[in-house]
Image (spheres, rainbow, N blue to C red):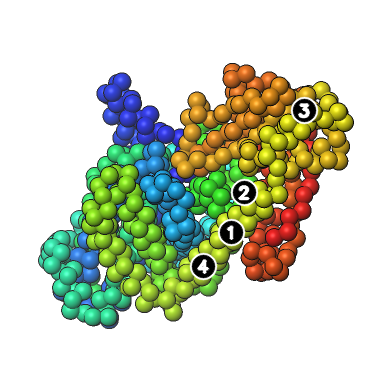
Amino acid sequence: MSSSTSENGAAGATAVHAHPVRGRRENWLLTLGSLGVVYGDIGTSPLYALRESILHAGDAPTEMEVIGIVSLLIWALVLVVTLKYVAVLLRADNHGEGGTLSLMAMAQRAIGKPNGIILGLGIVGASLFYGDAILTPAISVLSAVEGLKYTSNIDQGYVVPIVLAILVVLYSVQSWGTAKVATFFGPIMLLWFSVLAILGLLHINDAPQILNALNPYYALYFMTNHGLLGFTVLGSVFLAVTGAEALYADMGHFGRTAIRRAWLFFVLPGLTLNYLGQGALVLSNPEVTGNLFFSTAPEWGRLPLVLLATAATVIAAQAVITGAYSLTHQATQLGILPRLAVYHTSERERGQIYMPKVNWLMLAGALFLVIIFETSSNLAAAYGIAVVGTMIVSTMLLVPVIARLWRWGWVAAIAVALPFFALDSAFLAANLLKLADGGWIPLVLGAVLIVLMWTWVRGTGIVAAKVHKESVALDTVISSVSKSKSTVRVPGTAIFMTSDPAVAPAAMMHNLKHNKVLHEKNIILSVRTEQRPYVDRESRSTYERISDDFSRVVLCYGYMETPHIPRALDRCKADGLSFEIMSTSFFIGRRSFKISPQGGMPVWQDRLFIYLTRQADDVITYFRIPAGRVIELGTQIVL
C-alpha cells in the first residue's frame, strides 16, 4: 500500500453527507486501513525502545530511573506524535496530500517564488528519509526474529539467515503489487495493538507505582538529574517515535480524520499500556531486561507472539518500502531526481507503484545492515538520526506555511514551531551521541543522496539555461517557415516535445536544417509539473492554435501523477486539436553531453550528472508514447 494514492479521504468525506451510515462505515474502514499502513513502524517500537533505553541507563537502574524512562517514552508519544503531527502537521495538507516534499511544495507556494533554501530543506528531508527506509525493515524484522532465541532451542547463528531470507522474499514480491496483501494489514495490526494493550495490562499490577510515569514530572526529573546519561537514554527513547512521519506522509490515502482516530483510539492507548506494563515488569523482575518485550507474554504464548511480531514488522517494512517508491516518484516529478522506471501494480489505485531500481538498492542496503550489525541492539545505534533530521526539516518548512498560507503571521508561526524545533533539537543532540556506534551510517547515506539530488538539480538547471540561450523564439521560426519555398510539406501531424513552449524545439530545428521537411500539422508539446499532488481533468491541458499549421499544447500534471501523453492529447480533441495517434510522429531530442573544465560544475560533478542521465528512464517509456511513432534526433551539449 503506497502513501501516494487517489483522494479516497475526500471521497469518504463526501459519502458521510450523502449516506450517514455508509459514511461512518467507510471512515472506520479507513481507520482500520491506516492501522496497517501508517502505524506499522511506530507500532513495532515496543520490541526494542524501552529495552534499549533501560540498558543505556546502566546495569541496575533504580525505581525512579525506570519510572522516569517510561515517562520519557510516554511523553515523547504525546508531544511529538500527538501534539506536533496529529494536532498540527496533519492540518498542513497540500490538496489532501502530506509528506516532506508536499510540505516543501506548500512552502514554495507560500513564499510565492522558487526559493533555494526551501528546495534545499526538501532535498535534505527526502535524502534522510531514505536512511530511515533502509533501516526500518532491517531493525524491525531483526528484533522480531530474535524472539525465537527465547521461545525455542534455535541457535543464535540462525537468526541472521532467517532475517535475510525474510527480507529477500519481501523485496522480491514487490513487483506483484500490495493490493491483495494489504487487505490483511489492518486486521493484523489491530490484533497487534490489542495484544500490546493486553500484555501491558497483565503486568501493570506487578508494580503499580509505574503509573507515576504518566506524570511528566518524572521525565523532567530524570533528564535534569542524570546529565549526559539523560541525553544518552533520550537517544534510545526516540526509538519510540520513529515512524511518526508516516502519519503525515500517508494523509492523502486515508485522510486526517481516519489517521487521528486510529492514533487516539488504538495506537496511543496500546503503546502507552505496553510501555507501562514493560516498566512494571522491570521493576518486579530486573533480570528480564535483555528479553523485555517477549517476557511480558506467558511461556505458552511467546512463540505465537514472535510470529505475530514478525508479521507486524513485515507490515512496517512494507509500508516504508512503498513510501520510498512514493517519495522517489514525487522527487522525479519535481525535478529533484532523474526519471526512473515506474510500474503501476493496480488498475484502480494510481498510487500503487513499483520502482525496480529503488527496490533493489533498498534491499542491498537492508541486507548489508543486517550482516554488519547482526543484532537489533547494535542496529539501534544507527537508528534515529535520519528520522529526527526529517522531523527538523518538517518543522522548518512548516513556518512559512503557517505564516502565509494559514495567514497567522510570522510571529505566530515561529511561536508555534519553536517549541517543536527545541524538542527535535534535543532528540538530535541525544542521537548524535550514537554517532560513532553506527549513527554515521544514515548520515553518510543522506549525504550521498544530497550530493546526487543537488547535482541533478544543478545540472538540469545548467542544461536548461544553455538550451534556452541557444534557442530561437518559436514565433520567429514559424514566420520564417511560412515564407520559405524550400521547405517540403508532408502529410500528417508532427509533435515536437520541448520543456519551453516559447522557443522552437531542438528536434524541429534539426529536422528543418538537415531534412528540410515539415509536416502539414505541427504541435509544440510541453509537459509541466505543478506544485500540487494532482491536477483535475479540466485543468490538464491548455491548447492554443498559433497558425494554420502550428499549435501549442501544455499538459499539466501533479507531482504524484505519472504522465500519459496519448491519453491527455486525446482529450484535447474537444478543444479543437486534430490528433490521430497512428498518423502522428513524435519528434524527441536525445541529448549527449561533453565535459568542459570551464563549465558551470566541477568535472567530478559533470561526470556524476552524465551518469545520472544514463540511469533515467527513456522519454518514450516514461511518457507512454508509442515507440513505433517516435523519431529521435540527437544534440550534444557542452556542460
The residue positioned 61% from the left and 26% from the top of the image is 544
The answer to whether the residues at label 3 and label 4 have Cβ atoms under 8 Å apart is no
The residue wearing badge 3 is: 482
Q: Label 4 is placed on what type of residue? A: Ala
x, y percent for residue 11: 38, 29
Q: Which residue is mark 1?
A: 458
Chain-order first, disc 1 or disc 2:
2
Q: Residues within 10 Å of mark 2 (few under 14, many from 20)?
A: many
Of the two numbered discs 3 and 4 in the rendering, the one whose residue sits closer to the viewer: 3
Q: Earlier in the sequence, mark 3 or mark 1?
A: 1
Badges 3 and 2: C-beta atoms under 8 Å apart? no
Identify the residue shown where x is 73% and y is 32%.
Answer: 478
Instruction: Name the side, left or right, on which 497 lies relative to 354.
Output: right
Position in image of residue 201 (x %, y %): 20, 55
CA gap between label 3 and label 2 equals 37 Å
Q: Circle 1: is it few (<14), some (14-19), or many (20+) Cα within 10 Å?
A: some
Q: Is residue 505 above or below residue 454?
A: above
Query: Quick one: SS at disc 3?
Result: helix
In front of the other: 106 or 318: 106
Q: Position of residue 398 (x, y in %)?
A: 34, 53
Residue lying at 73% horizontally and 28% vertically, measured from the top left = 522
Q: Is residue 514 above or below residue 160?
A: above
Residue annotated with mark 2 = 339
Badge number at residue 447? 4
Mark 1 element type: helix
**Residue 533: percent from the left, percent from the top?**
46, 40
User: What is the CA distance from the residue labelled 1 to the residue labelled 2?
Assistant: 16 Å
Marks 3/1: CA–CA distance = 38 Å
Instruction: Tell which tag, 1 or 4, sits nearer the viewer.
Output: 1
Q: Earlier in the sequence, mark 1 or mark 4?
A: 4
Observer able to see residue 123: yes
Considering only vertical position in the picture, is 195 above or below 373?
Answer: above
